[in-house]
Image (tube, grey):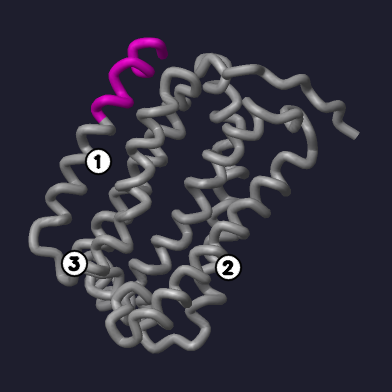
Amino acid sequence: MTRARTLVPPVLLGLVVAALVLSGIRPYDRLTWLLETVWVLVGVPVVLLVWRRFPLTTLLCCLLAAHALVLVVGGHWTYARVPLGDWVRDALDLSRNPYDRLGHFVQGFVPAILVREILVRRSPLRGSRWLAPLVVCACLAFSAFFEMIEWWSSVAGGSAADDFLGTQGDVWDTQWDMFLALVGAVTSLALLSRWHDRQLPAAAPARPAPAVPVG
């Protein structure tokens, strides 16, 4: 486990940086690429800056790297034009490219573990029955905020922001996006919480918080 914690983060960092650079080579639309990948452009430096004081679990590192890859792929082609999504659409006879749906599911699935890790290590919520509901609420809040960003982009950019919005003509796209983020967050907590708990002690939590009695 110690060796994995030493080797995995730099390997994942190299993979994400390489994918980001490649995605920036002749993307479908440069503005869309920037809007979609800005979370990676900001997130990578933030993780590096806080790593000494707050090293992340290996599980969270892998999830963040996977999320970054989803973002850079969507940024390069735009979500409505990702070839893998076109293949799934044709294979399943869908009415739209579903890559955007995957992106919003991941938008709940990955941040759920990120928020959980922060709350367990830096708040009194460790062991509390309120931990999971508050994690889900935080993920939904971020999803709603992201939809506001899309709205502001649409108002500011007009038709130029269509590729960023990726609605593909679906009037219920915003509601679907937030619902899938909710499903992603709940699924993540249901599948990964115990695995996450086993890795948390090895992450050397900073300023461990006292447990809150359950009940």
Please name the amino acid that badge 1 sits on. Val
Front disc: 1 or 3 = 3
Question: Seen in the image, is 27 located left or right of residue 53?
Answer: left
Q: Is residue 94 magenta?
A: no
Q: Which mark is residue 16?
A: 1
- Dot 2 and dot 3 residues touching (CB under 8 Å): no
Residue occupying the point 43% across, 82% down: 155
Q: Does the magenta stretch include residue 2?
A: yes
The dominant secondary structure in magenta is helix
Q: Mark 2 points at which residue?
A: 179
The reply to whether discs 1 and 2 touch (Cβ–Cβ < 8 Å) is no
Q: Nearer the viewer, mark 2 or mark 3?
A: 3
Amino acid type shown at disc 2? Phe
**Picture quadrant of residue 130:** top right
Residue 58 is situated, as x and y percent measured from the top left of the image, at 42, 26
User: What is the distance, in whole Å, between disc 1 and disc 2 at their CAs?
Assistant: 27 Å
Return the residue nearer the eye: 61 or 210. 210
Q: Which residue is drawn at 33% across and 38% down?
A: 44
Is 133 drawn above or below residue 202 in the view shown?
below
- In the displayed structure, would residue 161 be above or below residue 184? below
Rendered residue at 36%/71% (across/down): 98
Real-space CA distance between mark 1 and mark 3, rounded to the nearest whole angstrom: 19 Å
Q: Earlier in the sequence, mark 1 or mark 2?
A: 1
Q: Is residue 48 left or right of residue 198?
A: left
Name the residue type under label 3: Arg
Q: Is mark 1 on a helix, strand or loop?
A: helix
| Magenta region | 1-11
